[in-house]
């Protein structure tokens, strides 16, 4: 479907209208435009034309505004999403979880830029991405669509994606604000879930948990990414629906963070017209369809009844118009909907490059990289022969012929000298026979994830029940009984074990959207997590298997050894919630912080991932100050002591001192860097820290709370994962600490800048 694209610029010349003078600020230009609007025009702008696409009609936009023809304002078009554009065919990049696994902000920027370039070429002004919700439980059906369990990692990846996207002139949309961490269980997709469903559940948490875990990535997108729009989510936070939550939409977002953009509701998330308008919700794209609010009649009624003032209405209209001015919408002609404009060949390469950096090597007993002596490879598993990705609004339809499956990639790379056999794994005896007859077996297995319904447990075999036909429901709340319900006729865990029993050189390539259980990990020779790998997944996998490139991925989420290790396990009040209240009583202890606090041994810890080479980390040093307002900079020299080039991902964690009333997690990520190091060479990596790296939210401050640096000894540790730390140093903040490398004062109340400035590297002898 072609849009009304190529429409003339609303401001063809600077003197066409009083609001066209480009020397004026976006806000003043918006004032003038809003003043010129009639009440009818204002009222009509706040509700969208509805879902033009929603994945059912391919080719259309996900949403559109109503035009104001009298003033020359054309329709504004919107499209999903965080993985790629959901409009016709598009480049299917590796999913966001994979992007996060690269720990490479340059790639995140390029991913955002590529998706927005395609959105623009399809006539869209706004792209509905990125999704930055925290992985609180890997059962969440949208786990694949997120950046994992670490707030800072979400913040940095999201900011980079937004910056890349908005560099094209398209406006990004950070979503889903906030606390949208589950879809619910036992429901039917997409909107109904009986137990803890996203439209009714309330994420109930303390202010500190909200400020430290569930908001900073949104805050970063606003303050650093300068994101133009934000999507309020379906759920409630502390019993108030987010799209009518004045505290979240006005006090925090606009007053405290200074957001000047436009708030868009998720599709069906707006709960009331007057409540939404008064809270700060500007635009309801699916008005009249999924949302029973924000229709012109309803808005007029709210005005007439005095539930909403005209000045409030003007504020909502101003937010929309002001955003359009700020992003140049008035000063350019409409984007043309024409796929010919898309540099598909470049994006195909990018899809492969991201996946190469995302593939995370979790175990390797020496079988990888594959040797030249490998003459026969048995590829096993349906996922080897399919394009595997997540469902819902993060779905992307790749171009015909663009997909390289694992089997395609392995066959291409193996060439004629190597015999590659394939079986889908449905016949265990045949799988074992082929594996036994080969030099190496590669089992490609994964899970099923989709928006709309959570997985009912954490193993591969226990996936999204509403989407799998032949599974039976056996759950006992969050402590779901691990079971052997087959997906597509295959019990993946049993398949891996059977192949491993037949072939000691068994490599497992996982294609999952997030953490799963790996009960067979001690029986296999190697484990790679390839995530939902995007359209070029097979090429990237083959290049990693043969060692053409080093696996660059590190885990953005902890892989538990058993389901009962998870912070959300064993207590229905936490997950999926009781009577639609999910109690976030684990507080700050999300992901690795929970495992550390409870001294649990996961299967694979946060930040883990192996290289084909070996690195030696020097001692951590700390200097005062640093770039762009940094208060201190941590430095480490890393030497590649192996014989191959490789990718190191040094991670810096901070252990803040526990003081009353602020108890602290054992450690938290403070900075990281992904760096390619040639064999035998060294690189010095510098990781700047700002005051926020040391701060905590103290709810007792100033009545409503504020950021504070706990007085005491802050220990920095550097290493290769959250559990492999090689060196540490203490920074004293407002206290005497024996052996401290640096003493820094503790300042009073302040609004701290967010993520630390960018890390850097330089070659070292
Ligand atoms: C999703 C959003 C998406 C919207 C439009 C909703 O169900 O939660 O992420 O942007 O649909 O497709």
Image (cartoon, helix red, strand yellow):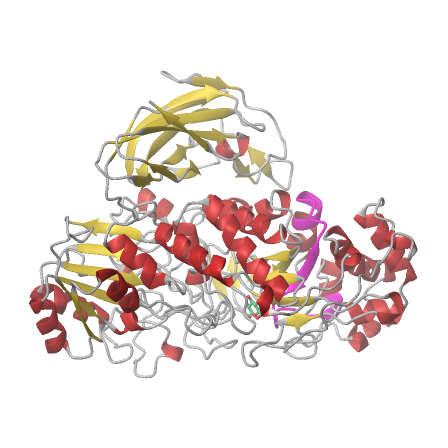
The magenta segment is 253-275
Quarter in which the N terminus is drawn = bottom right
Tell me if residue 322 comes above or below residue 50 in the rendering: above
Measuring from the top left, give residue 499's x and y in whole percent. 13, 67
Q: Residue at x 32, y 78 (%)?
A: 473
Q: Is residue 708 left or right of residue 8?
A: left
Q: Residue at x 41, y 38 (%)?
A: 673
Measuring from the top left, give residue 284's x and y in whole percent. 69, 68
Is residue 735 in view? no
Q: Is residue 538 left or right of residue 322?
A: left
Picture quadrant of residue 45 = bottom right
Q: How many numbered discs, if any?
A: 0
Residue 325 among those drawn in magenta: no
Between 305 and 135, the one nearer to me in the picture: 135
Is residue 85 in view? yes
Residue 272 among those drawn in magenta: yes
């Amino acid at each position: 479907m072609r849009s009304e694209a190529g429409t003339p610029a609303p401001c063809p010349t600077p003197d066409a209208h009083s609001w066209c003078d480009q020397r004026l600020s976006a806000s003043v230009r918006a004032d003038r435009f809003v003043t010129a609007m009639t009440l009818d025009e204002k009222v009509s702008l706040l509700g969208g034309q509805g879902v033009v696409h929603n994945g059912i009609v391919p080719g259309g936009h996900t949403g559109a505004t109503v035009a104001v023809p009298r003033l020359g304002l054309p329709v504004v078009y919107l499209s999903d999403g965080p993985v790629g554009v959901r409009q016709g065919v598009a480049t299917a990049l590796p999913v966001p979880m994979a992007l996060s696994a690269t720990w490479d902000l340059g790639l995140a920027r390029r991913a955002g830029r590529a998706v927005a370039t395609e959105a623009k070429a399809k006539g869209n002004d706004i792209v509905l991405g990125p999704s930055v919700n925290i992985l609180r439980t890997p059962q969440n059906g949208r786990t694949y669509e997120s950046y994992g369990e670490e707030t800072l990692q979400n913040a940095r990846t999201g900011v980079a994606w937004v910056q890349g996207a908005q560099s094209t002139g398209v406006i990004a949309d950070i979503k889903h604000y906030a606390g949208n961490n589950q879809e619910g269980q036992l429901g039917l997709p997409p909107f109904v879930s009986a137990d803890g469903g996203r439209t009714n559940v309330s994420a109930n948490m303390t202010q500190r948990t909200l400020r430290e875990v569930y908001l900073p990535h949104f805050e970063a997108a606003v303050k650093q990414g300068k994101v133009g729009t934000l999507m309020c989510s379906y759920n409630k936070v502390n019993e108030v629906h987010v799209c009518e939550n004045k505290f979240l939409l006005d006090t925090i977002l606009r007053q405290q963070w200074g957001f000047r953009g436009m708030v868009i509701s998720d599709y069906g998330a707006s709960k009331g017209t007057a409540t939404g308008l008064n809270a700060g919700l500007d635009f309801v794209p699916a008005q009249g369809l999924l949302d029973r609010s924000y229709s012109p009649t309803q808005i007029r009624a709210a005005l007439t009844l005095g539930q909403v003032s005209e000045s409030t209405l003007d504020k909502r209209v101003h937010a929309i118009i002001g955003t359009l001015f700020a992003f140049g919408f008035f000063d350019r002609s409409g984007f043309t909907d024409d796929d010919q404009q898309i540099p598909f060949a470049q994006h195909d390469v990018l899809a492969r490059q991201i996946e190469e950096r995302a593939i995370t090597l979790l175990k390797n007993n020496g079988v990888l990289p594959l040797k030249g002596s490998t003459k026969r490879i048995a590829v096993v598993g349906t996922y080897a022969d399919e394009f595997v990705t997540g469902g819902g609004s993060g779905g992307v339809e790749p171009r015909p012929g663009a997909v390289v499956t694992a089997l395609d990639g392995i066959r291409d790379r193996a060439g004629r000298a190597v015999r590659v056999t394939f079986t889908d794994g449905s016949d265990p005896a045949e799988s074992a026979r082929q594996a036994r007859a080969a030099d190496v077996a590669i089992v490609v297995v994964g899970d099923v994830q989709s928006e709309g319904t959570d997985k009912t447990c954490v193993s591969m075999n226990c996936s999204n029940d509403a989407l799998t036909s032949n599974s039976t429901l056996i759950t006992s709340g969050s402590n779901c009984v691990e079971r052997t319900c087959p997906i597509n006729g295959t019990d993946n865990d049993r398949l891996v074990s059977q192949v491993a029993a037949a072939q000691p050189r068994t490599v497992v390539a996982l294609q999952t959207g997030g953490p799963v259980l790996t009960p067979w990990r001690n029986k296999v020779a190697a484990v790679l997590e390839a995530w939902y790998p995007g359209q070029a997944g097979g090429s990237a996998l083959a290049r990693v298997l043969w060692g053409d490139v080093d696996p660059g991925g590190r885990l953005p989420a902890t892989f538990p050894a058993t389901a009962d290790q998870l912070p959300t396990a064993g207590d229905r009040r936490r997950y999926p919630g009781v009577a639609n209240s999910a109690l976030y009583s684990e507080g700050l202890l999300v992901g690795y912080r929970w495992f550390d606090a409870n001294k649990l041994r996961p299967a694979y810890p946060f930040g883990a991932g192996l290289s084909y080479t070996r690195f030696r980390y020097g001692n951590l040093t700390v200097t005062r100050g640093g770039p762009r307002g940094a208060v201190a900079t941590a430095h480490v020299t890393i030497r590649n002591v192996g014989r191959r080039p490789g990718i190191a991902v040094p991670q810096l964690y901070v252990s803040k001192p526990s003081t009353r009333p602020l108890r602290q997690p054992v450690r938290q990520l403070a900075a990281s860097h992904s760096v390619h190091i040639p064999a035998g060479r060294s690189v010095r990596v510098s990781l700047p820290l700002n005051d926020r790296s040391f701060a905590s939210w103290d709810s007792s401050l100033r009545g409503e709370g504020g950021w504070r640096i706990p007085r005491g000894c802050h220990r920095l540790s550097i290493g290769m994962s959250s559990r492999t730390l090689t060196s540490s140093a203490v920074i004293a903040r407002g206290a005497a600490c024996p052996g401290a490398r640096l003493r820094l004062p503790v300042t009073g109340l302040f609004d701290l800048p967010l993520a630390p400035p960018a890390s850097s590297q330089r070659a070292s002898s």
